[in-house]
């Protein structure tokens, strides 16, 4: 196939963009891998064009003028390649991989382009590596399948969620491209201090165990505290038989051994996850550029890896190493009790709805209603904590067993607490029961935007109970994920008004923007506005709350 350059390339591309349907775009393998973009491929189902990008300087203006979405196999990868090349990247993408995920609805389906073509009864595309003609044919297949699956998306009620996923590709790609500001020297200092503290604690623990037991058995050369089996055996030998050696379990042992072991276990986790190896993820620009999986969980939530910034615990010294330059700021905002607001909307419970409408403390309001006595953060606070555990537990499909563990009570007390709760809030009970029954009857759980997750009740009581928990939880958690993605798309359109402002991270219902220090207050206002507007697109009766802060490092 001919490689076009200059004005002939622009004319051919313009003609493709004017054709009916959604044109497909791909970049050469080198660009997909992070290298320089040299060849750009464009296609409709009928025609493909290969463009010499370096010899076609007007290509960026052509993309900027296009108002329609574009199609791609892995749209985020293509979008990032366009960003690296300095080309205007589309605001919306019809991504075949994301479309396949939506249609699969959690089932183990073939998510490749070939799998999606088979679902749409189209011929299997050739592999792009077979040559330029094969690459062009594959891209024509990409454009064809995007049009062919529209009816399936509509039939499955996935039009809304497919549109929000299409709009979320660009901001997610931008987050990866921009990266998080990072202080590597501070990270090394924190890691060194944590490793030194762990070594000091291990010395104390080994000495304590030697005093309590056989010195030969518990010699420093033979006992490895990071080996669960060895530690469990050693504790049993000195009179502390434990079911496991998790941090919360060993913390219950008498002082000072219990606190030492708990802190040692915590430090082991920190140094293994956030040690020197983490620095391998620092980019050439000194920033952290993680990879986000747009549909990283069956609920629709994003996941993050290489590295996983979602695992960074708030308030830790390591997290404080993500900090902006002196003349820059991080603006951090998250939704306030988003899952509970969704539960209020979906259940129609008047107490929940009224509490959110008037900005009340929902947990205190619920505790007062359930226990029949005044409750606040200062008055009977333990009852507020119990109500809080039930509120969030129900939003995540928790049963009596999970509630007992969360509140440290017996199973009988947890069951009584749930029963009292449901007597007080019958609409919550009715909604959850209907979600479980309806989900199993339909065969899938569904969010307010139409995202689906297929359910398999299995043949046992345990498998059915697990399917019921998913049917209760997925609509709430999935709707929360959808609201966050809508917010990302809205912010992608608003933030260019602030020079140098960019989305740099998101963790579930939290969004982080980096900007110039003088713009921080304006960005904070826009961030809150767009997050609230995103919630209002989905929740029509319950207001969405957003908490925000301007900071030098990633914290709130």
Image: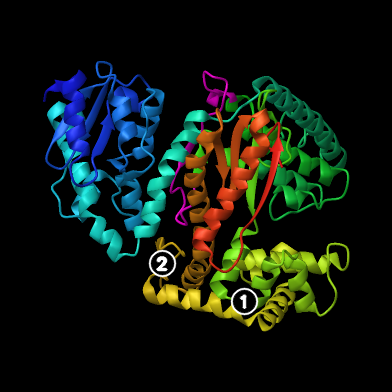
Q: Is 227 inside the magenta-drawn segment? A: no
When asked about the image quadrant of residue 53, the answer is top left
Residue 347 spot, x, y in % from top left: 56, 74
* Cα distance between the residues tagged 2 and 1: 26 Å
Q: Is 288 inside the magenta-drawn segment? A: yes
Q: Which residue is mark 1?
A: 349
Residue 226 is left or right of residue 35, and the answer is right
Q: Which mark is residue 455?
A: 2
Residue 335 spot, x, y in % from top left: 62, 53
Q: Quadrant of the N terminus?
A: top left
Q: Secondary structure at mark 1?
A: loop
What secondary structure do most residues of the magenta stretch adopt? loop
Q: Quadrant of the C terminus?
A: top right
What's the magenta region?
Answer: 279-302
Q: Is residue 105 visible?
A: no
Q: Using a 10 Å C-alpha cutoff, classify the residue at mark 2 as few (fewer than 14 neighbours), some (14 to 19) or many (20 or more).
A: many
Q: Secondary structure at mark 2?
A: loop
Q: Which mark is residue 555?
A: none
Q: Who's the residue at 52% across and 43% down the image?
A: 491
């Amino acid at each position: 196939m001919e490689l076009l350059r200059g004005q002939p390339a622009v004319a051919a591309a313009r003609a493709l963009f004017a054709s009916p349907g959604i044109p497909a775009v791909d970049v050469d393998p080198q660009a997909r891998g992070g290298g320089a973009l040299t060849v750009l491929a464009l296609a409709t189902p009928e025609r493909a064009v290969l463009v010499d990008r370096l010899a076609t300087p007007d290509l960026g203006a052509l993309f900027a003028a296009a108002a329609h979405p574009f199609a791609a196999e892995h749209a985020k990868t293509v979008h990032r390649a366009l960003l690296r090349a300095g080309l205007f990247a589309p605001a919306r993408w019809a991504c075949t991989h994301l479309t396949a995920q939506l249609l699969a609805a959690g089932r183990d389906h073939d998510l490749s382009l070939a799998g999606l073509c088979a679902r749409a009864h189209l011929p299997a595309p050739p592999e792009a590596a077979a040559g330029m003609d094969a690459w062009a044919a594959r891209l024509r297949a990409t454009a064809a399948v995007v049009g062919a699956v529209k009816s399936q998306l509509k039939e499955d009620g996935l039009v809304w969620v497919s549109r929000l996923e299409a709009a979320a590709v660009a901001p997610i790609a931008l987050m990866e491209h921009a990266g998080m500001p990072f202080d590597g020297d501070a990270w090394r200092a924190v890691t060194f201090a944590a490793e030194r503290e762990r070594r000091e604690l291990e010395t104390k623990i080994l000495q304590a165990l030697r005093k309590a037991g056989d010195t030969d058995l518990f010699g420093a050369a033979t006992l490895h505290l990071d080996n669960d089996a060895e530690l469990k055996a050693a504790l049993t030998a000195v009179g502390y038989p434990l079911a496991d050696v998790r941090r919360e379990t060993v913390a219950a042992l008498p002082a000072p051994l219990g606190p030492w072991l708990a802190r040692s276990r915590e430090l082991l986790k920190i140094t293994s996850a956030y040690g020197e190896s983490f620095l391998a993820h620092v980019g050439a620009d000194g920033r952290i550029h993680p990879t986000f999986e747009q549909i990283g969980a069956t609920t629709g939530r994003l996941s993050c890896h290489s590295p996983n910034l979602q695992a960074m615990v708030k308030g830790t010294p390591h997290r404080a190493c993500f900090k902006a330059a002196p003349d820059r700021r991080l603006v951090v905002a998250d939704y306030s009790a988003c899952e509970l607001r969704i539960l209020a909307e979906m259940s129609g419970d008047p107490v929940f709805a009224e509490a959110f409408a008037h900005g009340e403390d929902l947990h205190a309001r619920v505790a007062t209603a359930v226990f029949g006595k005044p409750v606040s953060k200062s008055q009977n606070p333990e009852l507020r904590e119990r109500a809080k555990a039930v509120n969030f537990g129900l939003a995540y499909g928790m049963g009596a067993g999970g509630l007992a563990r969360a509140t440290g009570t017996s199973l009988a007390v947890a069951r009584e607490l749930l029963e009292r709760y449901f007597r007080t809030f019958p609409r919550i009970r009715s909604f959850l029961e209907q979600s479980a029954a309806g989900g199993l009857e339909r065969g899938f759980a569904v969010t307010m935007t139409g995202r689906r997750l297929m359910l398999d009740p299995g043949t046992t009581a345990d498998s059915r109970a697990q399917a019921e928990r998913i049917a209760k939880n997925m609509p709430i958690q999935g709707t929360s994920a959808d609201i966050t993605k809508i917010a990302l798309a809205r912010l992608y359109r608003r933030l260019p008004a602030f020079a140098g402002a960019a989305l740099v991270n998101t963790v579930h219902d939290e969004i982080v923007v980096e900007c110039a220090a003088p713009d921080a207050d304006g960005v904070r206002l826009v961030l809150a506005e767009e997050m609230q507007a995103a919630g209002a697109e989905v929740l029509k009766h319950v207001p969405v709350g957003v908490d925000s802060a301007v900071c030098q490092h990633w914290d709130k």
